Amino acid sequence: MWAAPGHCLPLATLLLCLLLQQPGSSRAWKQHAPRLRLTYKDLLKSNSSRLLLASGDGMDFQALLMDEDRAWLMVGAKNNIFLLHLDHPNREPEKIFWPAPKEQVKHCQLAGRNVETECANFIRLLQPFNQSHVFACGTGSYQPVCAFIQLGARGKGARAPRMQLVTHSLESGRGRCPYSPHEPFTGLLLGGELYSGTSSDFMGSSAAFFRTWVHGAEPSYIRTEQNQDHWLHEPTFVGAYAIPDTYNPHDDKVYIFFRETAMEAGQWERRHIHARVARVCKNDVGGKRSLINRWSTFLKARLVCSIPGPQGTETHFDQLEDVFLLHTRDPRNPLVFGLFTVSSGVFSGSAVCIYSMAAVRAAFSGPFAHKEGFDYRWVEYKGRVPYPRPGTCPSETYDPLLQSTKDFPDELISFMRSHQLMWEPVYPQGRQPVLARVNVPYRLRRLLVHRLDTDSYDVLFLGTGGSSSARPGDTAGQLLWHSASPGAPSPDSSSRCFTDDGKVLKVALAGGASPAPEVISLEEISITKVPSPILDMKLSPKRQELFVSSTHGLLQLSLYRCELYGRTCTDCCLARDPYCTWDSKSCAPHLLTEKKRARCQDVLEADPLSQCQDTAEGTAVVEKVVFGVEKNSTFLECLARSPQSSVRWLVRRGEETAPSEVRGQGGGTRSRGGFVPRD
Ligand SMILES: *[C@@H]1O[C@H](CO)[C@@H](O)[C@H](O)[C@H]1NC(C)=O
Ligand SMILES: *[C@@H]1O[C@H](CO)[C@@H](O)[C@H](O)[C@H]1NC(C)=O
Ligand SMILES: *[C@@H]1O[C@H](CO)[C@@H](O)[C@H](O)[C@H]1NC(C)=O
């Protein structure tokens, strides 16, 4: 089983360190422990990352925009926009310096804001406009501004595109970009119109969902009604996506994801935050006599993500943090991945729930909610529903008299003034989270999903960060994460850092988005030198890279580090990383091996070890031989890479004797990373 150490000293004691791995029991056993846990130093050693941008003073690399085909990555940061050329990693990034005017910085300081972390132009929105122009918005030191960025598309080929700010396109960013660098918001540019969910004043109150023309020429806009709590109540916007509903383009809608203080739940007791999905028709232009410049198709429903508890109770994760839309072959039916957190005095956690568009649409086709009765309770609306059904997009295809929302009958407009909320919530697939992390020392804040072409698994990349900045009054956002006192919420919660900030968790869902996929925790990587929240992530499937930004830097991270799983077939297969496979010599990335999935078969398979020859009765044994000399107390290192391994020490004295196991502290002193033989 092991080669005799022929050249060894006669008195040598041979110590064997056996790393044991338990196969097939990942579901029950140390479920959350990742196969690999890498510190920032480990990551640098692994040669699988590259620091693209760094700043000591918190540049806040908040906005990433990638063009895979044209191989560039645009980065919005404090007072700067960078353009990186992905195919020429050694080329200096192009840069636009775009600070806020001096008077405005002074203004901001006089208003009591922090000059370093608030009174600057934090670039927060980067949206593609056309082949040559990107639309950008920044906080402008509490006076938001937007402008076009031109990419010198002329002279294709080797010449670098020269990026510049189109100064004559500068215009107000009010209602498009938040005033604060920390307020979550959402912006989506579609056909020259910007859909944005943001607050629109210095105090960060009165947030709304807007649509504005970005071309200045037409000052038209449309928004949610002001000061109407049943439309929106202290909302925090998380995402907006265009999703077609039918094959009729008149039906095209924009879906908006956010959280808000729920009017229908406990107004007088503790306030409740609910996660929401809302939608509007793209062709909504508001009403004619009433609801002028207001959405006339805005409807919202609750997004439920909860774990069933004893006696029919449910633990709700209501704090929506991030949404990822996973596109499928059918553009009308992407999968919606939602990342939620919950925090209370006794309990904190994060969860991922998956929603089908069918479930979302079902809620919008169901009954409306309504406030009625002597105590103004929210109940299901049972009255007559006007024609066309509220929320329907105007289309000549359905009714030649309805060419625009201005043609909607008064009865419908009047209904739409007071009925935004649907009665039925949207439940996730399988009625529960596909992944939940409860009472862990980190908070999941960013989510990105990579579906591998086979459809049988999805890989989730989850970024950790402090509590996402809360809007004034958004108490749940500021409540106890670790042990902060609820009586004294920090005014700027996003600047709080936890030592577990700045990590990326890689988790595979075997069985893809099936109702109960198996969760395989693969990696937990610190991607920042000092803990700082992950701000944004972008995936390049073509390059097999992830781009991760934080307060202090932008890092390029390979999707896998297969060789770190170990040197044997068993190690490699047991890791069950869908990016890696055994190529008969080493654990190697799938894409780079010719025999696709030749040795380690599908991660779904019950016994991933059947094809590995180095297996011992279902237990993977990695044998590591270390030499110790008698009367020598040199530390013998044997570090189990994976937290799912356990270590056994065997000792063999002389050449002929059989090895025996070292039990207890006999023969030496055991430590986590090794063994010190007793002298
Ligand atoms: C990383 O790269 C350095 C220099 O190219 C090399 O010496 C080292 O062995 C590499 N490490 C790994 C884990 O590949
Ligand atoms: C893109 O939009 C800009 C700004 O409106 C315009 O000047 C430019 O000509 C457009 N470019 C293309 C290729 O359409
Ligand atoms: C103890 O063992 C180590 C490693 O085998 C060796 O480098 C060292 O010289 C030894 N020391 C003594 C005192 O024998």
Image (spheres, rainbow, N blue to C red):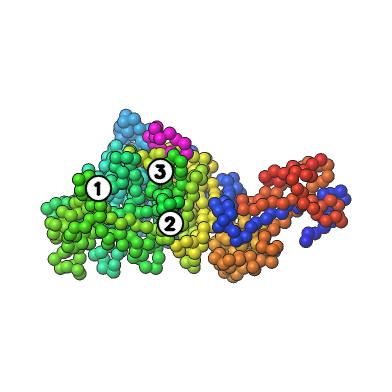
Q: How many angstroms separate mark 3 from mark 2 (CA)?
A: 23 Å
Q: How many angstroms separate mark 2 from mark 1 (CA)?
A: 28 Å
Q: Which mark is residue 468?
A: 3
Q: Nearer the viewer, residue 530 or 555?
A: 530
CB-based contact (under 8 Å), mark 3 and mark 2? no
| Left or right: 458, with 359 as reference point | right
561 w.r.t. 58: above or below: below
Is residue 246 in sight in this rendering? yes
Q: Earlier in the sequence, mark 3 or mark 1?
A: 1
Q: Quadrant of the N terminus?
A: bottom right
* Circle 2 residue: 432
- Residue 67: x percent and y percent? 41, 58
Residue appearing at x 59%, y 64% in the figure: 581
Is residue 589 in sight in this rendering? no
Span highlighted in magenta in the image: 480-493
Q: Which mark is residue 377?
A: 1
Q: Nearer the viewer, residue 382 or 574?
A: 382
CB-based contact (under 8 Å), mark 3 and mark 1? no
Q: Earlier in the sequence, mark 3 or mark 2?
A: 2
